[in-house]
Image: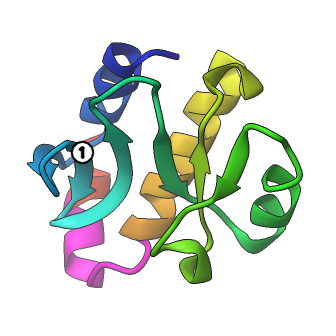
Amino acid sequence: MNIEEIRSFCLNLPGTTEDIKWEDNLVFSVSEKIFCLAGLEPPLRVSFKVTGDVYDDLTLFDGIIQASHFAKRKWVTVIDEDQLSRVEWEKYLLQSYELVKANLPKKKQAELNSTR
């Protein structure tokens, strides 16, 4: 996926907002909690949250590394976009969204779930 496809996918998730942070990162958040960030300068680098078992598996790939500053929270950075198929990109971006959303207050989760 390219940055525009990632942007389109993320913005279609309920309650998602986008912002530029740290000068050159396009950030996608749900209720002000980041679930994906992508560098705006080539080459494409995208970070997102994953589960512990997925983290262990993905970081075995050459083009996927521990996300700096986020690794202890089970975030990865894809540095070679071809390491994932479109289906995998969508699966992991949705998983990241859901993991972050699960830590929101129950009332906010209910609001987001009702907009689907």
> In this picture, which residue range is highlighted in magenta?
102-111
Q: Is 89 located above or below residue 56 in the figure?
A: above
Q: Is 21 located above or below residue 56 in the figure?
A: above
Side of 61 relative to 15 (left or right):
right
Q: How is the image coloured?
A: rainbow
Q: Quadrant of the C terminus?
A: top left
Residue 85: image quadrant is top right
Rendered location of residue 102, percent (x, y): 44, 73
Secondary structure of the residue carrying tag 1 is: strand
Q: 96 and 40: which one is in front?
A: 40
Side of 17 relative to 61 (left or right):
left
User: Which residue lies under the disc numbered 1?
Assistant: 25
Side of 72 relative to 58 (left or right):
left
Residue shown at 45% from the left, 75% from the top: 69
Looking at the rendered structure, the number of numbered marks drawn on it comes to: 1
Query: How packed is label 1: few (under 14 Cα within 10 Å), some, or many (20 or more)?
Result: some
Residue 84: image quadrant is top right
Q: Is 81 located above or below residue 95 in the figure?
A: above
Callout 1 amino acid? Asn
Residue shown at 31% from the left, 15% from the top: 4
Rendered location of residue 49, percent (x, y): 54, 61
Rendered location of residue 22, percent (x, y): 16, 57
Q: Which secondary structure is most common in the magenta stretch?
A: helix
Q: 65 and 4: which one is in front?
A: 65
* Residue 110 magenta: yes
Residue shown at 85% from the left, 43% from the top: 61
Side of 99 relative to 113 (left or right):
right
Rendered location of residue 45, percent (x, y): 48, 37
Residue 71: image quadrant is bottom right
* Residue 107 magenta: yes
Residue shown at 35% from the left, 48% from the top: 37
Q: 57 and 98: which one is in front?
A: 57
